[in-house]
Amino acid sequence: MSRLEQAVRASGELKLIPYFMAGHPNPKKSLDVGKRLAATGVAALEIGVPHSDPLADGPVIQKAGQTALAHGMTVAACLELAGEVAKEGTPVVLMSYINPILAYDPRKFAAEAAQAGVAGVIVPDLPVEEAEPVAGWLRSAALDTVFMVAPTTSPARMAAICERSSGFVYCVTLTGITGARKELPQGLKQLVGEVRKHTGLPVAAGFGISRPDHMQTLRGVADAAVVGSAIVAEIDAGKDPSVLVKSLLKACR
């Protein structure tokens, strides 16, 4: 069992994985955000690598990525930031689209991410059928490869995704882009149940999750909840996102 899998696996309470964008609102403040969030007791931290064409992201995270790029954030700088945050002891998962990784050199990316202390990588636009050799290089560097399943994923493809995932399986709760929602979609419990038929890994639910009542709904359903847009919106407004994170953690118990 990897460090990430152990950290995310539920043990009587829902785990929380906050997301923030590296370099947003600027590199110095995003490092401070990462350290603050790591100190709250969350299971893991997901750090976004900014990209000019973030096809899975809604307007809040798109804007954060554009701001980070405008401040000169690069893949190398993201790896450096992730390394500093990882020193706090909380497992770090990098979320990057495939093009920045390819442009940087996947083998170099894998080696430097591992050297920085990163625990795993999520590449939302890398289909499991086309994941090699990139996924192999990540695995060879002892990095967990987290793949995503969605409500539209067929049972056969879900099995393939679960087989190739490590650390945890990321269950996208809805069809569409990221962004806070008032209510979680119907059928979420059934979707997570289908995923569990194919894997013994922890299952983390993400997309649209933003409120304490969402945490309460997910308790006993998923092992962990990923919260992104709501946290990024707090950062964008100049607020301390650890306040929101602490309220979400309270609802996890």
Image (cartoon, rainbow, N blue to C red):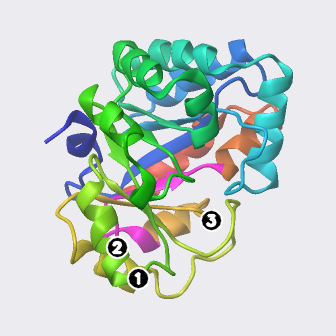
Residue assigned mark 3: 208
Tag 3: Cα neighbours inside 10 Å, few (<14), some, or many (≥20)? many
Residue 48: x, y in percent?
A: 60, 36
Residue range (magenta): 217-228
Q: Are marks 1 and 2 in contact (CB under 8 Å)?
A: yes
Q: Is residue 88 visible?
A: no
Q: Secondary structure at mark 1?
A: loop
Q: Name which quarter of the figure residue 139 lies in.
A: top left
Question: What residue is rendered at 54% in x and 68% in y?
Answer: 213
Reading the image, the residue beneath label 1 is 154
- Label 2 belongs to which residue? 158
Q: Residue at x 41, y 23 (%)?
A: 107
Q: 207 or 125, which is in the foreground?
A: 125
Q: Secondary structure at mark 3?
A: loop
Hey, what amino acid is under mark 2? Met
- Residue type pointed to by label 1: Ser
